[in-house]
Image (cartoon, rainbow, N blue to C red):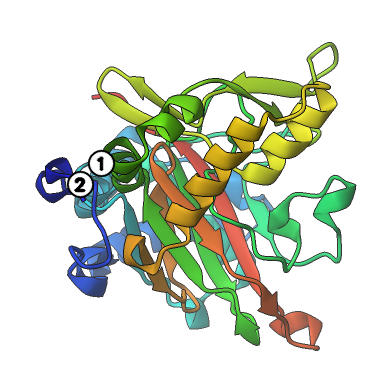
Amino acid sequence: MSSQTNRDPRAWTAATLSGPAAWTVSLSNSCLSLLDRQVQPLRQDLRPGTDLRLSEAEQTACARELQPALDILENGCGFVVLDRLPLEHYSTPEAQALYWLIGQGLGRPIEQNVQGTLLYDVRDTGQDVAYGARFSVTNADSTFHTDNSFGSALADYVGLLCLQTARSGGRNQIVSGYAVHDELAEHHPDVLEILQQPFHIDRRGGSRPGEAPTIRFPIFAWDNGRLICRYLRYWIEVGQQKAEQSLTPAQVQALDMLDRVLSRPEFRAEFYLERGQMLFVNNRWILHNRTAFEDHAELERRRHYVRLWLQARTP
């Protein structure tokens, strides 16, 4: 490992993380009380939770409560588990509204597809990625990736609220892009050079009329001294096929090396989310994976996460 890895807290490895204490933030009673007051109107009418907006004063108060989480996202290990929403006191729509409001304390919610979805259900629908589905609606291993790697603009933060867990599997795995970049720079600079060149990425039906079905970005890039990662290998393989530009042997070898580094246990944190917990990751440089899972037979018990994409607020 490079000396930079040891200096920069963002370039962590499993050995340098101090365990769950490094990434867990408890929601205070005052924060939960503030949010609870906002969801009360949902019990009197049928408005969708995404209609709720914090006032400027409430947003400031919520952001102050969530500042430890923001510090971790930007200057620490880049991912945080918020513990937790008391789901026993809320209906599913109310819990999602609370989560929506917490998102407003961390950033600005943005649309996740061309349909304008703001809260996206992550659960197995029986679809297949080979036929155009996203991994988020299957029970397959999602492989290490960043969200919206095919978008013209990245989401700064990705949130996942756990409403129901799987019968087995579905473990969260997190890797620092800074640590992976350092490893490649030190031991495989030729690979890193290839990964810093643009690839075609399949847009998974996310293009609007008149737009190309693929978009070109490098996997590793720098923006004002900040590392930007965009990666989901399958989207690249399909994108290159759609662009009728086969991956070169050197590109395939570079992607293989990247996947080998990503798969090494010493580079990742692993954990299961529990009901009511929320995971937020810095989507600019954290790569995440969800292992394959087996679900419950009962519909009401099947694994159900809710995803939120956020843009960071400028100071």
| Residue at 49% across, 68% down | 172
Disc 2 crowd, CA 10 A, few/some/many (<14, 14-19, 20+): some
Position of 199 with respect to 244 (left or right) is: left
- The residue closer to the viewer here, 194 or 138, is 194
Dot 1 amino acid type: Glu
Position in image of residue 91 (x %, y %)? 60, 73
Position in image of residue 29 (x %, y %)? 25, 70
Whether residues under marks 2 and 1 lie with C-beta atoms below 8 angstroms apart, the answer is: yes
Disc 1 crowd, CA 10 A, few/some/many (<14, 14-19, 20+): some
Instruction: For residue 194, say whether it is visible.
Output: yes
| Residue at 32% across, 59% down | 80
Position of 241 with respect to 62 (left or right) is: right
Dot 2 amino acid type: Asp
User: Which numbered disc covers residue 71?
Assistant: 2
Instruction: For residue 206, say whether it is visible.
Output: no
Count how many numbered circles sit on residues in the image: 2
- The quadrant of the image that shows the C terminus is top left
Residue holding disc 1: 74
